[in-house]
Amino acid sequence: MRDISRKDEDQGQVIDLTPMLDVVFIMLIFFIVTASFIKSPGIDVQKVRTVTAEKTKPSILVGISESDQIWMDKNLIKDNLVKLQLVRLFADNPKGGMVIQVDGNASIEKIALVADAAREVGITKISVSTLND
């Protein structure tokens, strides 16, 4: 008989999870709204330090790694596809410029390849990202 009365007590206690779910969804919305999204080319590079560096808001970011790999939109781009990728990115924002983030040990040939492709596409505002001392 004892077991029967215990079952009746357990059935009477119900935990309402609705307020907890409301709080969880409110927190989720808060974090989504307050999160800051940063554009990056997909790799970390060691920038060269300069005295005259300026801060700009680029619309196209290109990264060139120490091993001369070219990155755009977090994707590794082959040399022969650089111009095609720049055409696509420039079509999204034709008034924007381009910033090339170059590793200090990258070759000048890769920088020239990207800059030449950008000029052919029609990008006139081309900058090289450096560190400011």
Image (cartoon, rainbow, N blue to C red):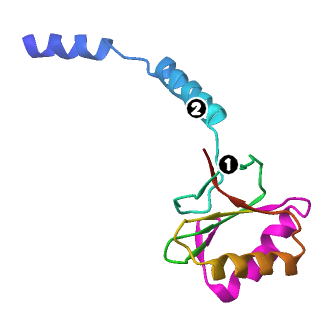
What percent of the width, then of the height, locates residue 59? 78, 57
Left or right? Give the position of 16 relative to 46.
left
Location of residue 41 with respect to 107 vertically, above or below: above
Q: Give the residues in magenta.
A: 71-98
- Please name the amino acid that badge 1 sits on: Val
What percent of the width, then of the height, locates residue 23? 52, 21
Quarter of the image for residue 94 reads: bottom right
Task: Give the quadrant of the C terminus.
Answer: top right
Is residue 90 something that shows in the picture? yes
Q: What residue did someone put label 1 on? A: 51
Is residue 1 something that shows in the picture? no
Q: What residue did someone put label 2 on? A: 31
Left or right? Give the position of 122 relative to 45.
right
Task: Give the crowd class for mark 1: few <14, some 14-19, many >=20 residues within 10 Å.
Answer: few
Q: Which mark is residue 14?
A: none
Task: Give the quadrant of the N terminus.
Answer: top left
Say which label, 2 or 1, has the lower sequence index: 2
Q: Residue at x 53, y 61 (%)?
A: 45
Location of residue 13 with respect to 23 vertically, above or below: above
Location of residue 54 with respect to 88 vertically, above or below: above
Which residue sits furthest front?
Answer: 51
Q: Residue at x 52, y 70 (%)?
A: 105
Task: Give the crowd class for mark 2: few <14, some 14-19, many >=20 residues within 10 Å.
Answer: few
Give the structural element (helix, strand or loop) at label 1. Answer: loop
Q: Residue at x 89, y 67 (%)?
A: 124
